Structures are given as structure tokens and as C-alpha cells.
Amino acid sequence: MMSDSRDYETSFLCVDRQNAQLYYYGMEPWIGPYNPGQPYIGEDPNATLGEILNKDNTNSPNRSTYVSTDVRDAVMMMIPSLIRLFGASEAPVFLVPRTQEEVDEAEQATDYVNYSFWNDNPGFLILYGCFKDALTVKTGFVKWWTDDHKETKRKTFLNVTADQIQMMLSEEPEARLISVGKPVKQPPPQIPTAPPPSAAPPAPPPAPPTGMAAAQGPPGGPPPTPGMPMPAPTGAAPPRAGAPPPGPMPPPGAAGQGTGPQPPGPPPGAMAGAAPPPLPPSLMQPPPPVFDHCVIEFEESKPIIKVAGVPPEEMRLDRYARTFRDSRIVGHERIVPVDQLIAMGYDRDLCLEHIQTSESAFTVEPQLRNAARFMGTRIGDGVKYGEWYIKIDKDGDGSPELRYICTMGEDQQIVADEEANRIKFALFSCDPVSHTIVGDSLADYTEDIQRIKTNMTRAILDSAAEAINPKTVINELMVTVDDALNDDLGAVIRTRGNPAESVLFTNTPFLGQQALPVLQMLNETLQRRTGLSDAAKGLDPKALQSSTMIGVEAVINGAQERIELVARVLCETGFKDLFSGLYNEICENPNQQRTLKIRGKYIPYDTSTFDASMAVEVNANLGKGSDLTRMLALNQIKQDQQLIVQTYGLSNPVCGIPEMLNTITDMLALANVKNVGRYFKTPTPQQMMAIQNAPKPPDPMLIAAQAQMEKVRMEAAKAAGQQNFDTKKLLSEQTLRHQELTAKTQYEMGKLQVDAKKAHVDHITKLGQLGATLMKSQSDSDQADTQNQLDVAQQQQSSDDSARQHQQAINQAQLHAAQIASQHMQKMHQIGSQHVQAMTDMAARHHQAMTGHAVKGAQIVAGALTADADHAHESQENALDRDHDALTTAATLQNQQQLAKMKPRLAP
């Protein structure tokens, strides 16, 4: 299994990774006899990268060697967004409590694991390198382990006594004394004597120096050892015999320098020459010896969870595995120095047996990262060491178990074999492929784009070079060839004869303009494949121009969907396994009690209280919305909280001071401000209880609101009185106008009746005149008949006929006159009926208008109408008056027209 996994790495995986890294570093596509399908395995460790890749000899010096870096641009464009999402205030993954009582414990454990990853280890650099590997060479690997080796520290103490050394050794059982310096010479003890009356008290002897002063050595003592480190001592040196005890010095002129009772004797200023007092027993003993320095070695044992990234070429995978968790074998092979293996607990002889005697086959990947790595001659200072997690049935019970196996050497000799609970590696993949362990990367989507853009750009540059520097055609019989081959600016070309016939410059057109749309198409294809564009960064001017904030946010969120998907995949594939592994590693190792600074607060943690059975869950809102959207939402929440507190007080059941502090904390976290305690204090439960039970002072805002309400009430009463007065005034005006309209209507009706009677009299008069006219016509007719009888006596027959015809005409005229009179009477009766009907309709309309006027007046009195309604009512009354006048005028004109039409006409 180990050999198969190594073969899978060297024959398949490393080839794709090397090709992707060559594209990433801008070494592909290359001009030259180089076949990218061959693996990059070199035999000579001192060969340069160009020699290995056979790229040092290129046969086209006059061609453009430009290489587009689309792979690197895509990777470097996506990494900042991924790091921002994983390094934000919200945790990408968190521990899920099993019960309600474990909610606080789960939050503390999540904070502890995050602190272990981001603070105890270089979490940022680990994620940066891992994401870069996943985006470039398909896979990124991270491993973790517990570093429980003991750290040895040495401390040097100056001017210490034997008792102090013994006390420090007894306090630290694992401490041991390395060396002790020379004893310090001390001055002999001074016998206190009574000073003369005029003499000042003797100055006390100086205390032994400590710290940096001790480095110069005591007066008269030996100097310190050259090159000796001199850290500050952990404790103060004991006072020398005769030195004053610690504390304030006695005032000048005081007898003695001690703090205890003074020895018996004459007081200061007594007679000189008196016998000195007897010495106390403490001054008769010699002082303890003081050494100038001592060195003590301490051992500190603090197990720390270590996390590190693993180069992909050092990993060994199972080619048949479908997922990383189900892989039967996962290995890590690397060259480890001998001293590190000895520090890990391996025997020196065992390590020397497997020492590296020659450089093994290597890939180009590490040399691309460090070109000088394989150019040295350091061979034989390391051992090929492998760590393997293999699922095998070692005990033969029919169930495979996970084993942790360590190997040394090229032959993979097993040096350790033990059971393991889990694989302590995490695999990050940006685009997993179903049913296989290795997925795709951004390089797989952009390599062909980089190759095509490189060739297109080279063609554009070559075309520009040929257009700027055209080819020269010469007649070598008439031109000096050396002059024509000279490329210096302003160089002279010597010719014989006409220069136009000797030298000719070809005109090569620039064809790069036609290739620019192809480059634009390739850029759009690259954006569709990777989801990376200026809009994803909020830098697209087309998206920002003439768009609302919601529109711009929608464009940016749509462009960031691919980045959010990659972040979620990385979180599900690698970060979840890493977080779960760190948490189980913390729970399984010796319990620690630490005080950590989390969000500006010092919080004690005890890992023995953590529940190892809690599961790890991915944050479903990872990357959801931009920081601006979240800040706007938090601002709205803050305003709602302030409104609730102002309305219902701090004791309301919805939100209080803790909830408002949570909102402020989240807002500061979005602004990348971690230390919330620098700006806001967190009240204790006692302070919260005191705030809730404290009497509430009168709220100035409430007093102002009450005063404003009283003012509004007074203004409302004033407005109601004014409205009542205006209503009464309007009612009186409406009553007056109603009376005026009624009188005017009665006057008009009387006038219409008078006009009707006058029209009737005129009609009778006209009838009388018509009768007189008819009688006159009859008299004239008789006279004409008599005259006719007298004049035409002879023509009796014709006269009789004429008389007969005339009589018939008279009868017809009389009959016509009777018909006209009958029709006139009918017309008069019809006109009278229509006039009465018109007057009745007019009276009904007037009554209806008066009724509506009265109703609206009542509504105005009740306060239902406003000034606009009064204006509309007045306009309606004016319209009714105009309609009444128009109807009266129309009726009068119609009557006169019909009377004119009914005048009788005489027949001819």
C-alpha cells in the first residue's frame, strides 16, 4: 500500500501539479523544444531549473517571450476574499451543543479552539498557503499534533546565599543547579560606638548590589565572569551583616541605624571617652556567605497543539479512495534532520542507520518555490521519515482498525506502530470531483486561456515590432553591408548612386488591432469559468454607473456567488476536519487551565470540562451578504432596540443592555475592532439589578411631550371655538342667501305670469285685427262682385262662373281662417301647459336646491364640512342662480318665438 501510494504520487499527481505550478509562475507556455507531457524528474541535484526543463536554449531571440499569468491572477484574485471570509468575526465552523445546558460550554470551546488555531499557531499563514495550494495544484494539506516535549530554560541569579539557592531548588522539583559562582568578600562587621557630640552619625554600610549593579561586582570583590548572561534575579539578596534592614532611613542625628530597641548606654552627646556598650549576640556571629552568581536549569512542560501546512508533494494518498475520510492509507514522507528525530525520542544509532546517503529523486515543485534548495551539497544530514495512517486488520478479528505507523529510510522500515483514533490530516479542495479523492483547481480552468492569450499577445507584439522596425532591402553591390546591419539610431548607410534604388524599407502593417476582440472574448470566458470579475470586487464602473445601492449590491452579490461557493466547499472539505481534529486533540491531551484574552476580556478556561462528543457544524451564513448590508441590518436592529427601551424601559421582556451590547459588539467586529471593552463596559449582574430597581427620574422628553400635548389641546379648543363661530356665521349667511333667492324666485315667477297675460292679450288683439281684415276682405269682395255684375252683364254665364268661383274662394278662406284660429288656440293651450310645467320643474329644482342647501348648512353646523366644502356650496348656489336665470330667459324667448310662428297668413 505504501509503494502504491508513492507510485500514485510520482507517476500521476506530481505531473499535474508541476504543470500547474509552471503556469502559475509564468513559465508556460515556453518557446523551445520542451514537451510538457513528460514528468520533470532530474538526475543531477546541482542542475539548474532551466537545464532540467531544457529551456535555456531558445532559437527565437527576435520573437516576443511574453507569458500571460492568468492562472496566478485568478488565484491571487480569489485568495483575499477567502481569507476575509474565514478570518471574519463570525466563525466558519462552530461546536454544536447536545443540550440547552451546553450552549455556553460550546461557545467557550469554540472560542478556545479558534484561539488555539489563530493565536497559538500562525493560522493566517497556514490558511493562506493551504488555500493557495488548493487553488493552484488541486489539494492543500494541514496536519496537527500535540507538542508535549519539555522545554529547558536556564536562569542566572546574582548575589545569592546558600539558603536562597536551596529555597529555589525546593520550590521547583525539576530544577537543578548547574553552577555556583565565587563567594563575595564582605567587609568586617562594624561595632557601633557613641559618636562625639559634634560628630554626625556614621553612614550605614551599602547593601550588596543586585541586578545590573551586581554585574560590576562588589567593592573589592572579584569581577563577574566575562560572557555570563545577567537576567534580573527572581528574589532580592539577603542583607549583609551590619547593613540596615529594609525600610525608611532614620532621620539624621539619630543614634544607631536599626529599627529595634536601642542598646543601653549613654545618650548621644554624653561625655566622651565612656566605655562602649556590650555587643549583642547577633553581631558576634559571622554573616552567611554570598555568592556572586548561580545558574539554575528549569524544565517547563506545556503541551501545545501545533498546526502546520504540508507540501502536496510530501503527501501519499490512496488512488482508489473516493473521499479523504474513507481513504485506506494517508501518509506524509519528508526529510527530517537527525537531531529532530533524536528529540522526538528515537535512538541515535537507529537514525544513523537510515541516514540519507544520496539525493533521492525530486520534483520541480520545491525548486520552483526555492530555486537554491537542490543546488547545495548538503547530503547526509537527514533521514527520510514517514508518518502513515493505515486501515488494516492487524489483530485478525476481521475488522480493520486505524494504525499510526512511522517509517525510516528508502526501504520504509517500520520504527513505530500504534493504534490511532483519527487521521490527523485535513485535505482542502476548491472543486471536488465526485467519487474521487482529488478534485479540480482554478489552474485546470485557466491553463488553456493562458496559453491562447500568451500566443495572441506574442503575435500582437511581434506584429508591432515588425511595423516599428521594418525589414531593409539593399543592393549589396551599391550599399555597404556593414552599414545596413548597424541597428544604431541615426546610423549612416553608405551607397553608390541613387539611395532610392539602393536601399528600400518594407512597409509591414500592424495587424494587432484585429486580435484585440479575441483577447476580450478570452477575458469574458475566463470570468465565466472562474466567476472572478471587477464586479465581484465592487470595482466595475458599468455596474456602479446610474444604479441604486440595491442594484449595485445585487450585482456584487451575484458576482461573489462563485467565491462563496468555493469558501463553503473549502469549509466542508478541510476546515471542518481541521476544527474537529483540534477540538478532539485538546480534549484527549492533558487538561490545561489557561486564561485567554477573548474579545478584549480575560476569560479562564479549563479544558477538562469540555465535552468531546460535541459535533462540528459549518456556518451556513458563511459569506452571506457584504459588510455594508450587515452593518445596515445591525443599525436597524440598534434603532429598534433603542425605541423599545425608550418606550417600555430596561425591564422590558424583549431587549435590554446585554442585547444592545451584543449589537454594538457585532458592529465593531464588522469594523475590525476586537477590543469592545475599550469603548463599552459590561455591567455586572449587581449593577443590572441596581439599574432596574433605581427610581426613574422624570424624563425631560416626557415632560416636553406632555407640555406639547397641552399646547396641542389648547390649540385644538381654540380651533373648535373658531370653527363653531365660523359655522354660525356661515349658517346665517346661508339663511340670508336662501331668503334672497326665494324672493328673487317669486319675483321671477310673478314676472313670468304678467308676461303670459300680456302675451294672451296681444294674441286676442291680433285675432280681432285678423277678423277685421277678413271682414274687410269680404266687403271688398262684395263690391267687386257688384261691380262685376254691373260691368259684365252681358256675360251672365261667365259672371255666374266667376261668382261661383269667388264664393268657393271665400268659403275656403273662411275655412282656412277657422283652421288657423283652432290651431292658434291649441298652440296657446300647449304653450300655457309647457309654461306651467317649466315653472313647476323650476320650483321643484329650486326646492331641491334649497333642501340641499339646508342639508349642507346642517352639515356645516355639525362640523362635517371644511372651508373647501363651504366654497363648493357657495359655487353650487351661484350655479343654481345662473341656471334659474338661463331657464327663465329660455322660456321667454321660446314663448315669443312660438307666438311669432302662430301668426295667421292670408291665402292669396
Image: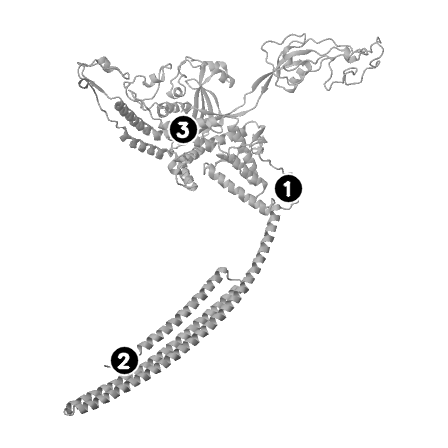
Residue in view at x 69 percent, y 8 percent? 185
- Tell whether label 3 touches label 2 (CB within 8 Å): no
Residue identifier under label 1: 691
Local crowd at mark 2 within 10 Å, few (<14), some, or many (≥20)?
few
Tell me the element at label 1.
helix
The Cα atoms of the two marked residues, 2 and 3, are separated by 114 Å
In the picture shown, does residue 506 fall above or below 894?
Answer: above
Tell me the element at label 2.
loop
Q: Quadrant of the N terminus?
A: top left
The Cα atoms of the two marked residues, 1 and 3, are separated by 53 Å
Q: Nearer the viewer, residue 551 or 663?
A: 551
Please, what is the three-letter code of the amino acid marked with disc 3? Answer: Met
From the top left corner, tell me how far across and down residue 115 is, in percent.
53, 29
Please, what is the three-letter code of the amino acid marked with disc 1? Answer: Ile
Task: Tell me which numbered mark, 1 or 3, is placed earlier along the sequence.
Answer: 3
Residue identifier under label 2: 905
In the picture shown, does residue 604 fall above or below 47?
Answer: below
Q: Quadrant of the C terminus?
A: bottom left
User: In this view, which residue lies farthest toward the left?
Assistant: 794
Please, what is the three-letter code of the amino acid marked with disc 2? Answer: Arg
Residue in view at x 39 percent, y 71 percent? 887
From the top left corner, tell me how far across and down residue 383 is, in percent.
45, 16
Residue identifier under label 3: 76
Between circles 1 and 2, the one closer to the viewer is 2
Does residue 459 show up? yes
From the top left corner, tell me how far across and down residue 753 is, in percent.
41, 78
